[in-house]
Image (cartoon, rainbow, N blue to C red):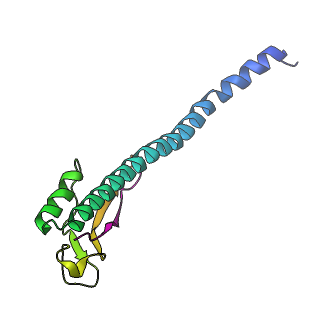
Amino acid sequence: MRAAPGRRRAAALREERGAAAVEFALVMTILFLLLFGILEWGRVEAEITIFEGAAREGARRAAVGEPYEDVVAAVQNHSNPFAPTPPISVAVADTAENTCSGTDTVGKEVTVSWSQSFSVSIPLWKDVSFSRAIQGVFRCER
C-alpha cells in the first residue's frame, strides 16, 4: 500500500529541516567575514588617508621654511586620532637640508615621509599586518 501524497511531502520536509539551518550557518559565516572585512579595510584606508594628509601638511610647512621640530609637530597634530610611526624624515632633494632655507633650496622638492605599520583584524580570520610608505612632497618656496 502506498502512502498518501500529503504524507510523503510531510515526511520529506521533516528529513530536510536540519539542512536549511546548516546552509544558513555556512552562508552567514561567509557574509559576516565579507562584512567585517569590508569594514576593517575601510578603517585602514581612512587611516592611510589621514596619514597622507598629515604628510602633505608637514611638507607644506617645510616648504615655507619652518624648523624640523615644527614640521614633525604638524604631522603629529594632523594625524589625530592616529599616531605616525617614528622616525619622520624631512629631506630637501639634492641637499643635506631637512627644511627649505636660503636661495639654494628654492624650487627643489621637500619630502616628508615615514614607513607606517598597519594591522587588519577580522573576526574568525587571522590578523594581517603590513607597512606602507607615507609621503608628502612640495616645492621649496624660500
Left or right placement of residue 74 versus residue 109 in this view: left
Q: Is residue 77 magenta?
A: no
Residue at left 23%, top 84%?
A: 95
Relative to the observer, which residue lies in front, 47 or 120? Answer: 47
Residue at left 31%, top 55%?
A: 53
- Name the spot of residue 9 as percent of width and height, x first: 77, 20
Relative to the observer, which residue lies in front, 33 or 97? Answer: 97
Q: Is residue 43 above or below residue 75?
A: above
Residue at left 21%, top 55%?
A: 83
Relative to the observer, which residue lies in front, 116 or 125? Answer: 116
- Farthest residue to the right: give it: 1
Residue at left 28%, top 61%?
A: 55
- Name the spot of residue 34 as percent of width and height, x first: 50, 45
Q: Is residue 43 above or below residue 3?
A: below
- Name the spot of residue 138 as percent of width and height, x first: 31, 67
Q: Is residue 133 magenta?
A: yes
Q: Looking at the image, can residue 19 be seen?
A: yes
Q: Looking at the image, can residue 124 be seen?
A: no
Give the dominant element type of the magenta stretch: helix, strand or loop. strand
- Farthest residue to the front: give it: 103
Quadrant in which residue 85 is drawn: bottom left
Magenta-highlighted residues? 124-142
Relative to the observer, which residue lies in front, 23 or 56? Answer: 56
Q: Which quarter of the rendering shows the C terminus?
A: bottom left
